Amino acid sequence: MINLDGDHQAFAEEIKVRSGINFNTCLQCRSCTNGCPFLEGMDYAPNAVIRLVQLGLEDQVLQCSAIWVCVGCNTCCSFCPMAIDIPAVMDSLRHKALEKGIKIPESDILSFHTEVLNTVKKYGRTHKLEIMMRYKLKTMDLLSDMGVGLKMLKKRKLDLTPSKIQDKKAIEKIFREK
């Protein structure tokens, strides 16, 4: 059991409530980290981000780039033996950072996340290849991380064509409610 002071405990509890995830079951086994296709772009591995939250280290975790680099692909969740929804925690941390007006350490990352949402709105799911292509065109940074894209293709983490959901109206409703 981790004994935290009041401020640290309050932050950890807030993120737990916001995300709806009990991240205290994390074993720190690093399975999430070993599966993350974006690890190379992160300053903290996914398991380390969870640990920072567990310890209530608000400033450190809200200022890290890992929470912005995470694209919510759920690869980490599929590897986690405790089925912790790490992208939900990352999302809660991003919202908290924006609310606090913390400077985003990754340039153009909001453009990237906008492209993620655009594919969800269009297909009901993310289409990683389209996200990457649109983002790269928007920022005109076409070749800087081609190695990551090639690795993702090799590991079959990028589908050439998007998969679509049947109930497009459900997605439209979600975007109207936000």
Image (cartoon, helix red, strand yellow):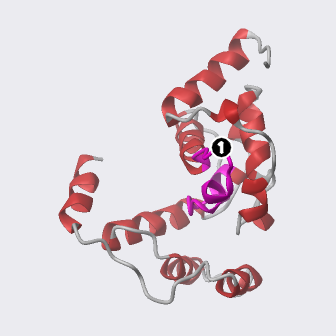
Residue nearest the observer in this picture, 161 or 111: 161
Percent across and percent down for residue 167 are 22, 66
Residue nearest the observer in this picture, 6 or 159: 159
Image height of 153 relative to 178, above or below: below
**As shown in the figure, which amino acid type bears the numbered disc 1?**
Met
Q: Quadrant of the N terminus?
A: top right
Residue nearest the observer in this picture, 37 or 103: 37
Q: Quadrant of residue 63?
A: top right
Image height of 65 relative to 17, above or below: below
How many marks are shown on the rendered structure? 1
| 75 within the magenta span | yes
Left or right: 166, with 93 as reference point: left
Residue at 66% from the left image edge and 57% from the top image edge: 76
Image height of 85 relative to 107, above or below: above
Tag 1 residue = 82
Q: Which residues are magenta?
A: 67-86
